[in-house]
Each structure stands twice: as structure tokens, then as C-alpha cells.
Image: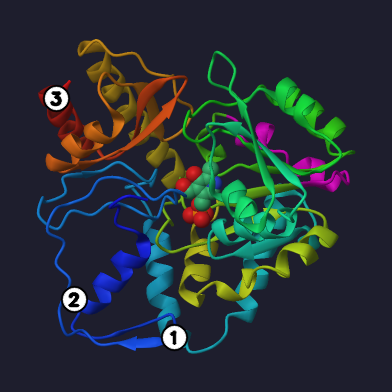
Amino acid sequence: MGNSISRRTLIKRGALLAGGFSIAGGLLETAQASPVIKSPSYSFPEVWSERDIPMDPIVPMKARLSANENPFGPCDKAKAAIMEALPTSYQYPFMALGDLVQKISDFEKVKKENILLSSGSSPLLMAAGLYYGKPGTNIITGDPSYADLPSKAERMGAKWVKVPLTADYKLDLDAMEKAIDANTSLVYICNPNNPTATVLDKDRLKSFCERVSKKVTIFVDEAYIDYLDDPQGTTLIPLVSSGANIIVARTFSKLYGFAGLRIGYVVTQPETIKKLTMYSEATWSISATTLHAAIASYQDREFLDAALKKTIASKNYLYEVLKKEGYTYVPSVANFVIFPIKMDGERFVGEMMKRGVSIRNWKFNSQDWCRVSIGRMDEMEAFASAFREIS
Ligand SMILES: Cc1ncc(COP(=O)(O)O)c(C=O)c1O
């Protein structure tokens, strides 16, 4: 892990700097000497979590383009709903939970018993990693792809089978199917894929899921599906209604702008919901305020379309900057873009961070890559001027 600032360190530092004390590992630690981070660190934890954002207390942040958030959200209706829900937020939100499940059920045309809510989709990815990651099993994913679920499974003792992407940076469904053996407990499909922002052909993915789910459970992570032209025609939620052994994960963290509010869900078979709830608080981890915000903003087309439009404008601007500087990029269907860089990835992240711009780096196909999230136009301009200095 090198000298990376872990989330635990950040939380602990935050608590200490606030002048209080923190309880770590069951011990009460008093803040006698406030830890000062002398030299900023830009590397990331071994097991990456999008939440482990590097923070530099010295350089003012101009653009936060490292966690694929939507800087245009949440919508005004969500903010008003939070204020309205505050006075009664001493109560457990039993009714609101049912209301949100009902809305999703109506819109997606799926039964309520197929839906499991949680405070973001991460707790459900983790629950799947813990349940399907038993020692002796293996989990198949693309490479590179979103590492959260398989990294948790690996920690439980499962083998993580990484299948390289195709030449056009998409998940290689044929190779993933070939990799399945008698010990495979789960196939994880991230569609659109993070970090490449590529999407699979919908008919091919559907027939893959119909066929393969007869042998093994498939987890389809649709975190970025709201950025597509036709989310309803692309989602695999209808396969759940036809009885397929798949888990479809969705989140409000992306286009809805709820990354800090925390709400997500899976749509799957009721018996799979039972398995996942063995490993997650799921529904009971959601705050009343967030629930009311989600109900108020669910399918708020006016807001979603405006956010999409601004995302596309910022993305087109980024494409132009990259082209002008002589860079290529992988065309993106989501709110982030990956492109090959001409220097060591960690150095690149560090140089950008020194200029107040956070981005992420990857290494695959013997090449260093930068993944830049799509932000507001002022953030993209900050990216552009920092990038021009070092490109
Ligand atoms: C592919 C993918 N799935 C799931 C998540 C987790 O999102 P959340 O826990 O905020 O719902 C992320 C976050 O970046 C992601 O990129």
C-alpha cells in the first residue's frame, strides 16, 4: 500500500483534527498529537475503493474528477424533500422505504419482492462478494473492471479470475464464458464498464445472461446505465421477472447526484435477496432524509436530461482538449473518459493533483492510463490548463 492515505487514516485524521477522539479497534485514542501529513501522497490503496479520494491539505482543489460523481446533482426537489423530512427524521422511515420500492417497482415493471434497497449499491456489492466468495470458488470479471465486489470475494478466499477486455475495450463475453468452471460461483458484468466507459451490445449481453445464468449466478452492475440513450432498452431487469438467476445493481450515486446521500438497490430473485441480507444491513442502513430525497427525484426527467446535457457538453470539451494535445481516448458512454498517457501513471496523478485536479490512473495492456470524470465546465477547464502544462 506504500504511503497512500487510506480511508481509515483520513477518517481518523478528520476526527483528530476536529479536536475530539476516535475509537479505533476498540481502543479510545486521545488526540494528544495531531497527525500532520507532511508530504501529500497520491497513490491509492491496494484494494481500490472510489471513496478513497486522495486529499491534499496544501493545494486547493479546483476540480474533483476522480470518483465519477455528478456535480450537477442532487436536484432541487431532492434538496427540498430533505428539508421537509428533517422534523420527522427521529422516526424510522418504514413508510418511505415502501414508497420508494413501489416507485421502482412501477417504473421497472418488476415485483416489489424482487427489490432490495441499500445505502448505495456498494453494501450490496460487498454482500455479494462475501456470499459468493467462499474459499474454493472463483469469481469471473473483466480486466480492468470495477474491483469492489471481486476484491471482497478474494478476501473471503475466492479466486478472482480476470479476463482481459477485447481490442475495443469491452468486456469479452466469449472469453468470460469459457473461463467458467465447476467452481465458478459468480460472473460479474459491469455494464457500462468502469474504468473504460464502454457498453456491450444489448442483445448479445441478454442472450449471454439467459444462457449462462442457467449455470451460474450473474451480477450485472448497471451503475452508469442512466447515461445511456436507452437505459430502459438496455437494462437486464426484465430478465429477473422471467426468473433468471441474475442480480442487477443500480445506484442513485451517478446521474442522480446522490453519491454523498447514499442510496442504491438490486433487483433479483427473492431467494437471492435472502442470501444478500445475511451479509448486509441493506434497507436499514438508509436515512429517512435520503429516502425522501430519492422518492422526490426518482425519474425527474427535467433534471436528469439537463444533467445529461451538461455532462455531454463537458465531455465534448474534454475530447477536443485531448485531440488538440495529440492524445487519443476511448469513446465514452458514461460520465468518465479513459485515455492513454505518456508518463508514469502515479507521477501523472501527482502532477495533476499539485495543480489542484484529482483524476485516477490505471495500468493495463502495458500502458499507463488516466481516467477523468466529467465535471462542471469550470472543472474541465481546470483539467485542461493543468493537463496542458504537463502533457
Ligand atoms: C461500477 C460501479 N458500481 C458501483 C459503484 C458504487 O456506487 P455506490 O455505492 O455509490 O452506489 C461504483 C462507484 O463508483 C461504480 O463505479
Residue 57's place in the image compared with 374, above or below, is below
Q: Which residue is mark 2?
A: 17
State how far apart marks 3 and 1 are (Cα). Answer: 46 Å
Q: Which mark is residue 390?
A: 3
Q: Earlier in the sequence, mark 3 or mark 2?
A: 2
Q: Position of residue 28 (x, y in %)?
A: 34, 89
Apparent side of residue 260 relative to residue 105 in the rendered image (left or right):
left
Q: Position of residue 216 (x, y in %)?
A: 83, 42
Figure quadrant of residue 52 = bottom left
Three-letter code, disc 1: Gly
Q: Secondary structure at mark 3?
A: helix
Q: Residues within 10 Å of mark 3 (few under 14, many from 20)?
A: few
Residue at the image position 56 percent from the left and 73 percent from the top: 285
Residue at the image position 42 percent from the left and 62 percent from the top: 78
Q: Check if mark 3's residue and mark 2's residue have beta carbons within 8 Å.
A: no
Q: Residues within 10 Å of mark 2 (few under 14, many from 20)?
A: some
Residue interval drawn in magenta: 230-246
Q: Which residue is mark 1?
A: 26
State how far apart marks 3 and 2 are (Cα). Answer: 34 Å
Q: Is residue 186 magenta?
A: no
Q: Position of residue 165 (x, y in %)?
A: 58, 22
Three-letter code, disc 3: Ile
The answer to whether residue 184 of the structure is visible from this angle is: yes
Q: Earlier in the sequence, mark 3 or mark 1?
A: 1
Q: Which mark is residue 120?
A: none
Three-letter code, disc 2: Leu
The number of numbered badges drawn on the structure is: 3
Q: Secondary structure at mark 2?
A: helix
